[in-house]
Image: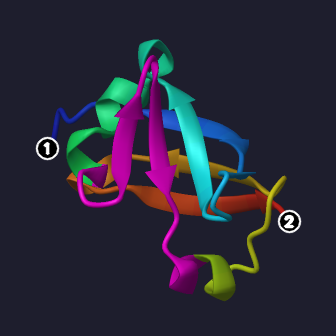
Amino acid sequence: MSTEEVTHIAGPVEEDDTGRLMLRIPLYAGGDEFIDCTREISEIDGVFLKIFLPPWLCTKFALKEGSRVAIDNAGRKVNLQVIEL
């Protein structure tokens, strides 16, 4: 039986200045729990963790700015679920 703690966060997809879609999560509100599992697709920007969504994922789920998603870190990886397009 695993005692792994899983962090769940929901919020909107945002677009950065270059047109990339991302999630911006405050580090103090759980973003720090996603640093390791998003290392290849994220960066720390002040008090936020910015997780950049790969274009193939945005296409697959028809994500756009304003879409609402939920993520968790079960299995030591980031898992995404679309709440509202």
Q: Is residue 66 above or below residue 10?
A: below
| Magenta stretch: includes residue 14 | no
**Left or right: 84 with respect to 35?**
right
Helix, strand or loop at disc 1? loop
- The amino acid pointed to by label 2 is Leu
Name the quarter where the C terminus is drawn: bottom right
Q: Is residue 6 visible?
A: no
Q: Is residue 82 above or below residue 45?
A: below
Question: Mark 2 — residue?
Answer: 85
Expressed as whole percent of the image width and height from the top left, the position of residue 3 reads 17, 32
The residue that appears at 48% across and 42% down in the rendered structure is 50
Expressed as whole percent of the image width and height from the top left, the position of residue 32 reads 33, 26
* Span shown in magenta: 38-57
Q: Nearer the viewer, residue 82 or 41?
A: 41
**Left or right: 8 with respect to 33?**
right
Which of the 4 image quarters holds residue 24?
Answer: top right
Q: Nearer the viewer, residue 37 or 74?
A: 37
The residue that appears at 79% across and 67% down in the rendered structure is 64
Q: Nearer the viewer, residue 2 or 78?
A: 78
Counting other residues with Cα less than 10 Å from the Cα at mark 2, is it few (<14), some (14-19), or many (20 or more)? Answer: some
Question: Mark 1 — residue?
Answer: 1
The residue that appears at 45% across and 17% down in the rendered structure is 47
**Left or right: 63 with respect to 85?**
left
**Left or right: 3 with respect to 6?**
left
- The amino acid pointed to by label 1 is Met
Q: Are marks 1 and 2 in contact (CB under 8 Å)?
A: no
